[in-house]
Amino acid sequence: MIVAGVGSRRGVTAEEVCAAVRGALARHDVKLSEISLMATPAMKGSEAGILKAALDLGLLLVMVPQAQLEAAGARAATRSERVVALMGLPSVAEASALAVAGRRSTLIGPRFVLGPVTCALAREAQTGGEGA
């Protein structure tokens, strides 16, 4: 499972969000069909651009509670002092992706920034079982 975590400034458009997600996919050589879910902080639940982007991309959107973001934030690869001041997290996109992908998930790479939107991709930890 791969999760696309999204962070943004207020009032972003669906086009801006979709462009950032597609940019992250291209940077990390991941296909949209490989993405299982899109994740964003629960406080972004009223952002119409994020909601519409998830629909446009055909992804289920998961709203991540602050406590889960904070727990996952310790595993973020990048740090924005602005985001730390606003949200108490080093990277909203990375924390969102990691929180939804699971406790042992890892980032595929650092967040991708395009204008007012960031997108990070996290992969669920592989289980130790044989065969798949």
Image: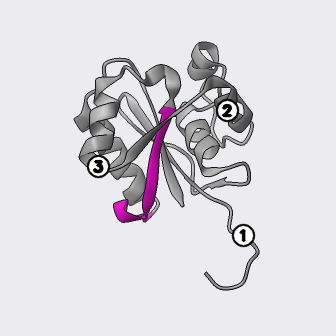
**Residue 44: x %, y % from top left:** 44, 23
Q: Name above or below for residue 36 compared with residue 97.
A: below
Label tally: 3
Magenta-tinted stretch? 29-40
Q: Tell which residue pokes out farthest to the top in this image.
A: 85
Cα–Cα span, label 2 and label 3: 24 Å
Disc number placed over residue 127 in the picture, else none: 1
In this picture the colour scheme is one colour
Instruction: Say if 129 sits above or below 88 in the image.
Output: below
Q: Quadrant of the C terminus?
A: bottom right
| Mark closer to the chain start, 1 or 2 | 2
Q: Residue furthest bottom?
A: 131
Q: Relative to the observer, which residue lies in front, 121 or 61? A: 61
Look at 35% across and 22% down and name the residue there: 47
Q: Mark 2 is on which residue type?
A: Gln
Per the image, label 3 sits on a secondary structure element best described as: helix
Viewer-proximal residue among 19 and 46: 46
Mark 3 Cα within 10 Å, few/some/many (few <14, many 20+)?
A: some
Q: Which residue is mark 2?
A: 68
